[in-house]
Amino acid sequence: MRITVFGANGNVGSRVVAEATARGHRVTAVLRDPAGPHRLPPTVATATGDARDPADVRRLAAGQDLLVAATRPAPGHEDELATATKGLLTGLAGTGVRLLVVGGAGSLTLPGGNGVALVDAPDFPAALRPIADACGEQLALCRADAEVDWTYLSPAALLEPGERTGHYRLGRDELLVGPDGTSAISMEDFALALLDEAERPAHHRLRFTVGY
C-alpha cells in the first residue's frame, strides 16, 4: 500500500511508520521540518506538510491508498487537534483516500459504568483532561463527516513505549481492561493493530479500541 503518515515523528507516528515499512508498504512521512531531527528509517520518503491545511492534505494524499493521522498538539495547544482534524477531513473529501485516525481513550466508556466515559471518572488525571477533551472533539468531527472513509482507533487507558508482543484484543466503545485490572497497550502493539486494520479493513466510519 501507499501510505502517508501525518505526525510521523511522534511517539505513535514513528512506530506506525516502522511497522508499515517492515510490512513492505511505501510510506511517506509528513514532517513540519524534514531537515530537522527525526527517528525515521533512512529509506522512508519524507515530505513537508501541515494537517491543518486542507491543500497540504490533498496534495500529500494524491495517489495514496491511506492517510494516517497521528498528530498530537503540544500541551497548551490542544485546540489545534480539532483544526488538524478539520483540515484532514476537508482535504480528503472526494479523494477516495481512506483515513485512519490515532485517537484518544478518554471517550471510551467504563466497563459496568452505566455509560460513564473514562474522562469523567473521579480518578481521571486533571492534567490529561485538556487533551482528552480535544480527542473527544476529534472523534465527534469524524462522526459528523459524511464524505471521508474514516476509522478512529482509541488505545487503552495506558499507552506507552514497550514491546511488540504481536497480541492484542479489540473492542468498540468500551474501555478494554485486562485480567489484572489494568487497561494498557504498548505503542508497538497499537501500531500493529492499526496496520492490521489498514490491510484488512473492518471498521469503516467507526471507532474501535485496542488493549491487552
Image (cartoon, helix red, strand yellow):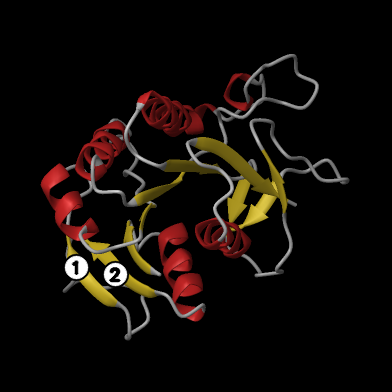
Residue 21 lies left or right of residue 89; in this view the side is right
Q: CA distance from mark 1 to mark 2?
A: 7 Å
Identified by mark 2, the residue type is Thr
Question: What residue does disc 2 label?
Answer: 28
Residue 101 visible, this orientation: yes
* Crowdedness near tag 1: few (<14), some (14–19) or many (≥20) residues, C-alpha within 10 Å: some
| Residue 99 rendering spot, x and y as whole percentages | 38, 48
Q: Residues within 10 Å of mark 2 (few under 14, many from 20)?
A: many
Residue 47 badge: 1
Of 155 and 204, which appears nearest the observer?
204
* Residue 110 versus residue 201 in the image, above or below: above
Q: In the image, is 99 to the left or to the right of 51? A: right
Quadrant assignment for the N terminus: bottom left
For this view, does 67 lie left or right of residue 131?
Answer: left
Please, which residue is most extreme toward the right here?
179
Count of number-bearing discs: 2
Quadrant of the rendered structure where residue 133 is? top left
Q: Residue at x 34, y 72 (%)?
A: 27
Of 161 and 76, the residue lying toward us: 161
Q: Which residue is more in the foreground, 128 or 11?
A: 11
The tag earlier along the polypeptide, 1 or 2, is: 2
Q: Residue at x 51, y 77 (%)?
A: 23
Type of amino acid under label 1:
Ala
Whether tag 1 and tag 2 are in contact, CB under 8 A, the answer is: yes
Identify which residue is drawn at 26% across, 77% down.
45
Q: Is residue 186 above or below residue 128?
A: below
Task: Please say if 52 is above or below 59.
Answer: above
Task: Note whether residue 39 is visible.
Answer: no
Task: Give percent across and percent down for residue 118.
Answer: 63, 26
Q: Position of residue 7 (x, y in %)?
A: 33, 56
Q: Quadrant of residue 61?
A: bottom left
Q: At which x and y percent is residue 95?
A: 24, 48
